Amino acid sequence: MVKVLFVCLGNICRSPSAEGVFRKLVADQGLEEYIQIDSAGTHAYHVGSPPDERARAAALQRGIDMSGLRGRQVDERDFYLFDYILAMDRDNQYNLQQICPPDHETKLCLFMDYADNWNERDVPDPYYGGHAGFERVLDMIEDAAAGLLEDIRKNHL
């Protein structure tokens, strides 16, 4: 079983969107029994809360239901549990590096490192913007998710 964790700041916009997109992609490929997926935030702002309403609406328009997801905060144990720990931006990557136990650094990278069609390294936080920001984030996430699945297939399945 390959275990993947997506991480952003509060776990209500970007990382649950990545979790939802990747869950659908994995399900569409019939790989649910081989890949475990979760998301978390580096801060505890929204622990127990559902994803942002705008993120859920944008995802639902693409056939992705995130209504069952709830925010949680990442902790040191996640570095032992997950094979891939994917930060949505460099700020959260830095925050993760601060709590990463020795010998687990190779699990941590930027999610956009797996994207083929975007030059940006950071998935922008759409929280303070409008609908178009959530759509752009989903476009970026879909591209990176495809690259991530290709990497998992190549290296683990």
Image (cartoon, grey):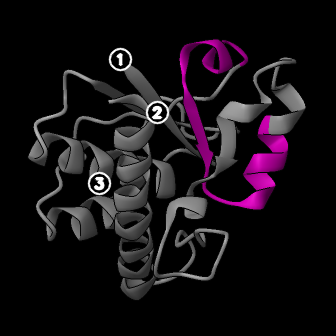
The image quadrant that residue 35 belongs to is top left
Of callouts 1 and 3, the N-terminal one: 1
Label 3: which residue?
21
Residue 77 is a magenta residue: yes
Q: Is residue 48 visible?
A: yes
- Residue receiving disc 2: 4
Q: Residue furthest front?
A: 154
Highlighted range, magenta? 76-96
According to the picture, the residue beneath numbered tag 1 turns out to be 1
> What residue is rendered at 36% in x and 51% in y?
150
Q: Is residue 105 above or below residue 58?
A: above
Looking at the image, which is closer to me, 36 or 156?
A: 156
Asked whether the viewer can see residue 52, the reply is no
Determine whether, in the image, residue 58 is placed left or right of residue 105: left
Of the 4 image quadrants, the one containing the N terminus is top left
Task: Name the residue type under label 2.
Answer: Val
Q: Which mark is in front, 2 or 3?
A: 2
Instruction: Provide residue 51's location: percent of width, then percent of height.
Output: 38, 49
142 to the left or right of 130? left
Dot 3 surroundings within 10 Å: few (below 14), some, or many (20 or more)? many
Element class at badge 3: helix
